[in-house]
Image (tube, rainbow, N blue to C red):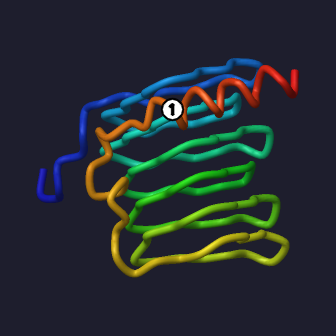
Amino acid sequence: MFGKKKSQAGLTYIAQGTKITGESQFSGDALVGGEIHGTVQSESSITIEPQGLINGEVACREIKISGYFKGKLQCEKLTITGSGTVEGEVASSQMEIFEGGQFIGVRVKEQTELLQNPNLVDEQKLQQIMDLDKAQA
């Protein structure tokens, strides 16, 4: 009644064992227990569970990583828990790493070209990611 109105968008859950490849957009919060490979945009927050993985490019308001993230990330707040690993390039105004959490990469002050235009998808790069996934399987 007196506070800010919260978004009516629901929670999106990517269950363990689920694999999504390509471009994903979430209007509400997202909880990732499975795998996402590609470009992810969220108007809200994303949580990567201990078994979860995102490999690609992410633009969101807030992200909490207990699993694994590899790629380019733009967010207001990044939290890496004790079981989380982030590998790549991060543009974030706030960053918190708990004991045991790992950050392998670079934190930039200014947004990269990709992060300024989250709709920009490098099809060649996406194909290379998909090819690597097939080769590892």
Image position of 102 (left or right of 22): right
Q: Nearer the viewer, residue 31 or 20?
A: 20
- Direction left: furthest residue: 2
Residue 78 place in picture, x, y as percent: 53, 66
Query: In the rendered structure, which amino acid carries the disc numbered 1?
Result: Gln
Image position of 90 (left or right of 67): left
Q: Nearer the viewer, residue 121 or 75?
A: 121
Instruction: Name the quadrant containing residue 103.
Output: bottom right
Residue 44 place in picture, x, y as percent: 35, 47
Q: Tell me the element at label 1.
A: helix
Q: Is residue 81 above or below residue 43?
A: below
Instruction: Name the quadrant containing residue 100.
Output: bottom right
Residue drawn at x 64%, y 45% as measured from the top left: 48
Residue drawn at x 13%, y 50% as measured from the top left: 1
Q: Is residue 48 above or below residue 4?
A: above
Residue drawn at x 71%, y 24% as measured from the top left: 131
Image position of 128 (left or right of 82): left
Instruction: Name the quadrant containing residue 66.
Output: bottom right
Residue drawn at x 73%, y 50% as measured from the top left: 68
- Quadrant (top left/top right/bottom left/bottom right) for the C terminus: top right
Q: Nearer the viewer, residue 79 or 110?
A: 110
| Tag 1 residue | 124
Residue 134 place in picture, x, y as percent: 78, 20
Q: Is residue 49 above or below residue 66?
A: above
